[in-house]
Image (cartoon, rainbow, N blue to C red):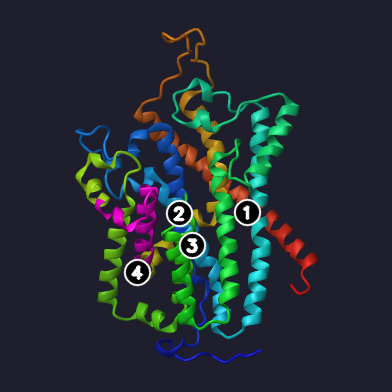
Amino acid sequence: MSMEHEKPLLGGEAPPRQENKRSVKWIDGFRGIASFSVITTHLARAFDGWAFMPSNAPNWPIRFVQMPYVRLWPQGRIGVAIFALLTGFVCGIKPLRQIRAGDIPAARDTLGKAAFKRPARLMLPGIIATLMICLLCQLGMFYMLPKVEVGWLPYASVQRIPFFDELYRLQQNLRSVWTDGKNEYDDFQWTLLPLLKVSMYIYATLTAVASLHFRYRVVTYVLFFAYYWQNAQPDTETFYCTAYYGLLLSDIYQVQEFQEFLQLRSWIRRMISVTLILVGFFIASYPGEYSDWKPWSRGLQNLDFLFPENSNLPKRFTSLGLLLAMTGIILNNSVKAFLCTWPIQFLGRHSFAIYLTHGTTLRTVLIWMLYGFGGRWDPNNVDENGIPLRIPRPGVGAFCFWVPCWLVVVYSIAWLWTFYVDSWCERVGQWIMKKTFKHT
């Protein structure tokens, strides 16, 4: 086993500096921000669909939640892209550290184990969440959704059917969520399959480039990124471009000269980082609909030459903006310090649990809080077409009171899920790995 280090960066690469866990602790904080944006976008889809537009109508004034930067929260597309980017970044940290130390066998062993554990860490919690939603469905917990004005939620929920029909539907969805990303019980799980696939792509790429010099690893990442950037297939920009860019940043982040740059040239570095963050998040604010209604979004349309034809422009702008913003965050120690604060870290530690459980509590607990338990619904109160009228949405005051209460419930359940479910799934993965690997 060769332990020789390569030459300094400009002629190869320098010996790696040992990084402690604190140096990448900000990643958890960024993941927590992403998970919170997922919550806010689903709230907006349910109760304020206009938030996705640049204004409520072409000549109407822009609302606060529709302004650039602010609209990132209700729009929410950036949350999934952050998950994919951090997948590429995190999957590369340990094996790249071993590769830079010259311990190629250890790096490949790490990659093999990580690839083996990854399905268990994603699939087992997803399966458990689906089983619990199926049980809630059989108990009739989603009964209020057809009775209330709540946007798209009734169409993203299932209702109770006979028990044996339910068993058939359950096994169909447990299969389909990992083959085509569709899960009738929990539509929010559509991201799990592409996140699993892209992590395997990253592991395979790292295995292939483990023996390459740094500069040629970078060339490989850039080629993969360029391939997916010119690919107009759905979600290539959201998952594959961002993941490979995250892998590129993960490798560069461990270069000693780069770490020294983060400590020096503070004025230049801060100016560059703030510019990248501001420009990046402005670009990522591109509206999902009717972008020609306001001058700022019409101006962004002029950048569509950067993308292949027939691509999803809102998702393309989100990914482009995120790549710029992530580069700025990497360069900004103050932002990373903020992401390491305990409230943001709390969000990050429970981000996966939040993602899996918030949709269920949104369709049950929050609906009960806002609309009650159905006593006000009269099936005989119908419109001109004979369709029963739904319970109207409550006022702003009710939202201001009940949504924070609901968030307490969401994060309490997420804490319990992380402590019990995620830890159990982790132990199952470790047990399987010990039984199957020659060396653990």
Q: Residue at x 29, y 77 (%)?
A: 266
First reached walking from the N terminus: tag 1 or tag 4: 1
The residue that disc 4 covers is 332
The residue that disc 1 covers is 122
The residue that disc 2 covers is 238
The reply to whether the C-beta atoms of the residues labelled 2 and 3 are less than 8 Å apart is no
Closer to the camera: disc 4 or disc 3?
A: 3
Q: Is residue 350 magenta?
A: no
Residue 331 place in picture, x, y as percent: 35, 71
First reached walking from the N terminus: tag 2 or tag 1: 1
* Direction from residue 288 to residue 217 in the image, left or right: right
Residue type indicated by callout 4: Asn
Q: Is residue 20 above or below residue 280?
A: below
Please tell me how crowded label 4 is: few (under 14), some (14-19), or many (20+) other residues with Cα within 10 Å. many
Q: Is residue 332 above or below residue 168?
A: below
First reached walking from the N terminus: tag 2 or tag 3: 2
First reached walking from the N terminus: tag 4 or tag 3: 3
